[in-house]
Image (cartoon, rainbow, N blue to C red):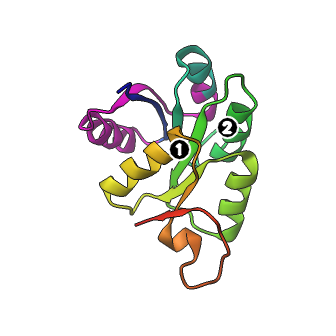
Amino acid sequence: MTPIRILVCDDHAVVRAGLLALLGSAPDIEVVGEAGSGEEALALARRLRPDVVLMDLQLGEGIDGVETTRRLRAETPAPHVLVLTTYDTDADVTRAVEAGATGYLLKAERPEDLFTALHAAAQGRPSLSAPVAGLDGSRDVGVRVVG
């Protein structure tokens, strides 16, 4: 089985280090790069051609995760983008999905849910964290719910 090639984009170095350690424990995932900004993620994605970009929404100075997602999805070939963030407002979710994000996960998810969502994203299948999907019926979504 060919490993899923992942590019991690988060502006916090400690978060990136934790994600790299976690993802490195999965035999079917290969982290091909890490970026601390949207601009860096775009440049690395063009060079490294990941299957999935694991994207934070807030990236400090420069372009944010939504705009980075929009630009990544306009590339040929376009990587899938799985948002991994702490922000769960309707506006944040809508902006990310409209920009082309394949999935939207909260950083509070269990590691196994992140792995499930990465596999889904690599296949172009959407997934959402349960709170984002509105299991209380507040959101009508037709995607896989994790967590």
Q: Where is residue 31? Give x, y as percent.
A: 38, 28
Q: Where is residue 9? Give x, y as percent.
A: 51, 37
Question: Mark 1 falls on what kind of element?
Answer: helix
Magenta-span inclusion, residue 26 = yes
Image quadrant in which the N terminus is located: top left
95 relative to 85 in the view: left or right: right
Tags 2 and 1 in contact by the CB under 8 Å rule? Answer: no
Q: Amino acid at mark 2?
A: Thr
Find residue 121 and name its label. 1
Out of 90 and 140, give the one closest to the viewer.
Answer: 140
What is the distance, in whole Å, between disc 2 and disc 1 at their CAs?
A: 17 Å
What residue is shown with label 2? 68
**Rendered position, 9 above or below 104:** above
Q: Which residues are magenta?
A: 12-41
Q: Amino acid at mark 1?
A: Ala
Q: Residues within 10 Å of mark 1 (few under 14, many from 20)?
A: many
| Residue farthest left in this picture | 25
Residue at image location 76% in from the left, 52% down from the top: 98
Instruction: Evaluate whether residue 16 shows in this view.
Output: yes
Instruction: Evaluate whether residue 54 shows in this view.
Output: no
Q: Residues within 10 Å of mark 2 (few under 14, many from 20)?
A: many
Work out whether mark 2 precedes mark 1 in sequence or the reverse, and give the earlier one: 2
